[in-house]
Image: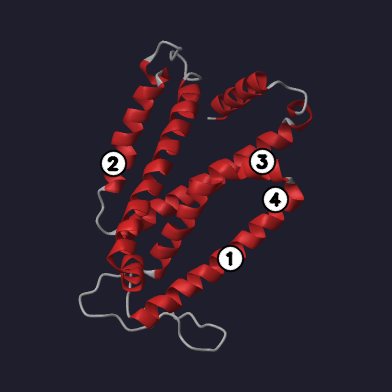
Amino acid sequence: MAQELNNEEGSTLIPPQKAPGEPRSSMISASFNFINSIIGSGIIGLPYALNQAGLPFGLLLLVVVGFITDYTIILLIKGGNLSGTNSYQSLVHSTFGFPGFLILSGLQFLYPFIAMISYNITTGDTLTKVFQRIPGVGPDHILAERHIVILLSTLAFTLPLSLYRNIEKLGKVSFLSMVLTFTILIIVIIRAATFGPQILCMPPQQLSHLWFSGAAHAS
């Protein structure tokens, strides 16, 4: 039974009943997928944004964006109930017609496509340096070629996960991704605290070499 969500008037935003034969993911799987989509796309650009805005103003903007996101999600749920729709595509189609549906379909394709390009670039730039810390893997090794690494990661992880027709099956993968993300965050905090005095005095090239050397020894 779906968990009920009440607004400020006390009325139910998400109706508890489920239409016969209608596929619906569990609340836990939907939460993991939703949180993972936010963390996965934001964790790459968030440090740069905080660096440009400054820590106090950046944290303030982060809180404001969080409130705006929460409010817009509630508006989507209310709009879905008022229009009798149960998906984002159906809500846009009932509100803006078929042209709006086509625009939404194009945007929903472009957003993950561009995000996947950024993920592949990040994978190719980081994993090649990590692999080079493995004994016997030099700059001329196949694992040091960023195009090969991107191709292997796409075939091994990205493509199989993209073939699911039901997003509910990605709940466990999203949970694992969240655990690994927080693990990396803890490692970065520990490394930053350990090399705190040296970080401010090191050039970027030396800092990068020190980081990957420590990561290789830790593994």
Q: Earlier in the sequence, mark 4 or mark 3?
A: 4
Q: Is residue 201 above or below residue 82?
A: above
Which residue is denoted by mark 2 in the rendering?
A: 159
* Secondary element at tag 1: helix
Of the residues shown, which amino acid type is indicated by label 1?
Answer: Ile
Mark on residue 68?
Answer: 1
Q: Which amino acid does the dot numbered 2 rest on? A: Leu
Question: Where is residue 120 drawn, in percent x and y?
Answer: 41, 34
Q: Which badge, 1 or 3, comes first in the chain's sequence?
A: 1
Q: Residue drawn at (53%, 89%), measured in percent from left and top?
A: 10
Q: Which residue in the structure is indicated by mark 3?
A: 189
Q: How far apart are marks 1 and 3 (CA)?
A: 29 Å
Residue 76 is situated, as x and y percent measured from the top left of the image, at 44, 72
Which residue is labeled 4 in the image?
58
User: Who comes first in sequence, dot 1 or dot 2?
Assistant: 1
From the viewer's perspective, is residue 123 above or below residue 146? below
